[in-house]
Image (tube, helix red, strand yellow):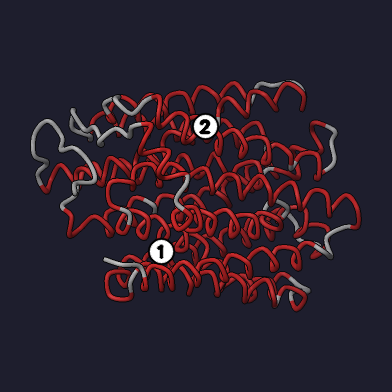
């Protein structure tokens, strides 16, 4: 059965290439916006006179909004032309970050952040759905992993840039930088995407069947559990590096850059091997890499040692999500659009749970418990993912 309706006219190879580059740029802007709070947390907390644990709740609140918004907005906007929808989402993102940079207090910033991040709830899954319509079936998995390189690039370029800008000029300039990137990405998407791209809408019956399918929900749960594991610690990287390792602005930015560089490498390696290894095997392998870093975390007592410990996590971080997207898109037939939206919810639900969990542990006893709690979440994600793979292999054709 077809996963999606074709565009108004058949997309040429040049159309697909242009659209892929534009959607990669859009994911770059979205990724920068999602991660800017973590990178700017030191200055943001100081400037707004809140603790890092309280400041981290910006991540939690935004993640909840994105997690709830992704399936609801996907259902409400299922008939929209994706060119218009994706460009408007990025424009909303740009305006929201610009306004957030002007907020005078934490109480004012929190609702502005939540409303801004609804655009991310729209863009990420709908970009994947749009490229699934445009790309030929035999290239669909690679096309999806390609546009998700934008998230890796956000980590390797955006995250250290935001961290350095926030540490030197202030968090408001870091948010303003995201606004400019989003505005440029909106223009790129509007120019590059052909009109008439509309994935097949999901009926209420399809949504009900998706939500009540144990195997589908287990697949999505892998994303939520791994996200909770990562963001229990990732949300507090900046204060951890400064307070526990004694890193200055340059050291903090270097570690973010290092993490992002290996994150990009991991996604590039994945895009070249996923068709050969299979998406499910890639998911399990990348989750294992992240668990390895968390288990080795106590060995990271300096910036140099931390750089070594971060490598497996970085290699698996963005590659894991790309592999999950490919597994959902390639193995769930007509349910793929709904599952891609739900997977986006799971990404942000995991972020919310992880940031909240980490904030509670940080407030109660400092940083020591964070890597062990994160490892617990990650081990659970691996167990569920392995179980999903076994069920899929034994399921009737």
**Residue at the (83%, 49%) spot, across then down:** 360
Question: Foreground residue, 327 or 152?
Answer: 327
Q: Quadrant of residue 376?
A: bottom right
Kindly indicate the quadrant of the structure image that contains residue 228: bottom right
Furthest-front residue in this view: 396
Is 364 situated left or right of 105 in this image? Answer: right
The answer to whether the residues at label 1 and label 2 have Cβ atoms under 8 Å apart is: no
Q: How many marks?
A: 2
Name the secondary structure under disc 1: helix
Residue 385 vertical placement versus 176 (above, below): below
Residue at 49% x, 63% y: name it: 263
Camera-side residue of 375 and 41: 375
Which residue lies at the image location 30% right of the left edge and 67% below the top edge? 396
The C terminus: image quadrant: bottom left
Dot 2: within a 10 Å radius of its alpha carbon, few (fewer than 14), some, or many (20 or more) residues? many
Query: Which of the numbered marks, if any, corresponds to residue 69?
Result: 2
Residue for badge 1: 267
Q: Residues within 10 Å of mark 1 (few under 14, many from 20)?
A: many
Q: Quadrant of residue 6?
A: top left
């Amino acid at each position: 059965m077809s996963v999606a309706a074709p565009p108004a006219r058949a997309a040429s190879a040049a159309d697909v290439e242009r659209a892929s580059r534009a959607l990669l740029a859009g994911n770059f802007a979205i990724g920068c916006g999602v991660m800017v709070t973590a990178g700017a947390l030191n200055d943001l907390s100081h400037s707004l006179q809140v603790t890092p644990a309280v400041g981290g709740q910006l991540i939690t609140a935004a993640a909840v909004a994105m997690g709830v918004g992704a399936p609801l907005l996907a259902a409400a906007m299922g008939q929209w032309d994706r060119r218009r929808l994706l460009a408007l989402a990025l424009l909303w993102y740009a305006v929201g970050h610009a306004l957030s940079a002007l907020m005078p207090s934490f109480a004012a910033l929190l609702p502005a952040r939540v409303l801004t991040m609804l655009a991310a709830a729209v863009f990420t899954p709908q970009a994947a759905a749009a490229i699934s319509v445009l790309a030929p079936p035999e290239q669909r998995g690679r096309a999806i992993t390609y546009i998700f390189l934008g998230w890796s690039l956000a980590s390797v370029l955006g995250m250290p840039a935001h961290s350095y800008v926030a540490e030197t000029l202030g968090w408001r300039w870091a948010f303003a930088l995201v606004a400019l990137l989003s505005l440029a990405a909106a223009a790129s998407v509007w120019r590059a995407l052909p009109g008439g791209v509309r994935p097949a809408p999901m009926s209420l019956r399809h949504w009900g069947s998706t939500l009540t399918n144990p195997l589908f929900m287990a697949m999505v749960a892998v994303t939520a559990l791994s996200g909770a594991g990562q963001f229990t610690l990732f949300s507090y990287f900046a204060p951890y590096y400064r307070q526990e390792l004694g890193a200055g602005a340059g050291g903090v930015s270097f570690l973010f850059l290092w993490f992002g560089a290996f994150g990009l490498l991991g996604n590039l390696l994945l895009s070249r091997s996923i068709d050969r290894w299979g998406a499910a095997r890639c998911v399990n392998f990348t989750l294992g890499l992240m668990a390895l870093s968390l288990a080795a975390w106590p060995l990271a007592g300096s910036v140099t040692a931390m750089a070594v410990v971060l490598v497996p996590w970085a290699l698996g971080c963005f590659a894991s999500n790309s592999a999950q997207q490919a597994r959902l898109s390639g193995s769930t037939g007509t349910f793929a659009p709904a599952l891609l939206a739900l997977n986006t919810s799971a990404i942000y639900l995991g972020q919310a749970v992880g940031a909240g969990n980490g904030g509670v542990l940080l407030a109660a006893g400092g940083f020591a418990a964070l890597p062990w709690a994160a490892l617990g979440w990650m081990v659970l994600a691996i167990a569920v993912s392995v179980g999903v793979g076994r069920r899929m292999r034994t399921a009737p054709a």
